[in-house]
Image: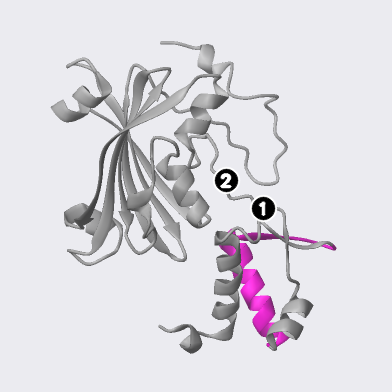
Amino acid sequence: MSAASKPMYQQLKDLIIGRISAGELRPSDRVPSENELVEAMNVSRMTANRALRELTDEGYVRRVAGRGTFVADLRAGSHVLEVHNIADEIERRGHSHSSVVIRQSLQHARGEVAKALHIEQGSDVFHLLLVHRENGTPIQLEDRHVLAGFAPDCMEQDFTTVTPSAYLTAISPLQEAEQVVRAVMPNAAVRSHLQMRDDEPSLVVLRRTWAHGAPVTFARLHHPGSRYELAGHYTPPGTPKSATGTVVELEKLRQ
């Protein structure tokens, strides 16, 4: 669908999302109000209201009563219930992150990759395979497929200096994510990349992320069972937080 054939509220949404993606509007920056959109874009108040309402529902902006509408903080966080950047997670522990790129290629999507990304068999996708290290020790094998149209310059990136997660978040704010965590016995290739024992299980996170209303990446994140754990604290909306810090006490408990 061409831009001109889209409903005006969608054109307004695309305009604001485009400014956020380009970095013209950053987290906490004020977004034009309904009145400003009506005057600047020559649209009805109903159209402007719908555009801002849907942007709020989709997580791109937040509306503060009496103050206005602001770009939401869409950075990744290190939490079992959230998408996180492993480099940030490692650095928060005071350790050093490094990575080794094993594969960075253009492929044609097949099987479960095409199914996960909701695209036709044979569609162009980029395949990234990296080993992330913490203080030199392998801690994650990232096996990620990225929709080529979403990140056309993916092949030019140096993923030893920036993680795929950080790069993709910079292209476009994360709209939605799905995760499944499984304990499995890895194959020989995974064991080799992560320097695991033959009898050691791995923790695998299957993750799909969405932007602009469609899935754009599908990843399998493999971790050595003896060197990785997921932790987090959840407080239901509107409920005061009881914990005074991070998940510390539970981390002290061992079986």
Residue range corresponding to the magenta coloring: 43-66
Can you say which quadrant of the picture contains the C terminus? top left
Q: Within the magenta stretch, is there residue 27?
A: no
| Residue with the mark numbered 2 | 75
Where 19 sits versus 188, above or below? below
Q: Position of residue 59 (x, y in %)?
A: 59, 58
Residue 187 visible here:
no
Pinpoint residue 119: horizontal percent, then vertical percent: 27, 65
Q: Residues within 10 Å of mark 2 (few under 14, many from 20)?
A: some
Nearer the observer, 209 or 30: 30
Judged left or right of residue 238, residue 51 is left
Say few, some or many: other residues with alpha carbon within 10 Å of mark 1 (under 14 / 14 to 19 / 20 or more).
Answer: some
Residue 136 figure quarter: top left
Q: In the image, what residue occupies the spot 41% across and 27% down? A: 98
Is disc 1 placed on a helix, strand or loop? loop
Quadrant position of residue 10 = bottom right
CB of mark 1 within 8 Å of CB of mark 2?
yes
- Across and down, in percent, residue 4 comes to 50, 88
**Residue positioned 48% across, 44% down in the render:** 166
At label 2, which amino acid type do we have? Arg
Considering depth in this image, is 65 or 94 the residue closer to the camera? 94
Residue visible at 30% across and 59% down in the picture? 117
User: Could you tell which of marks 1 and 2 lies nearer the N-terminus?
Assistant: 1
Amino acid beneath label 1: Pro
Residue 139 vs 238, above or below: the answer is above
On the image, numbered disc 1 is attached to which residue? 27
Residue 230 in sight in this render: yes
Disc 1/disc 2 C-alpha distance (Å): 9 Å
Question: Residue 102: image x %, image y %?
Answer: 25, 35
Q: Secondary structure at mark 2?
A: loop
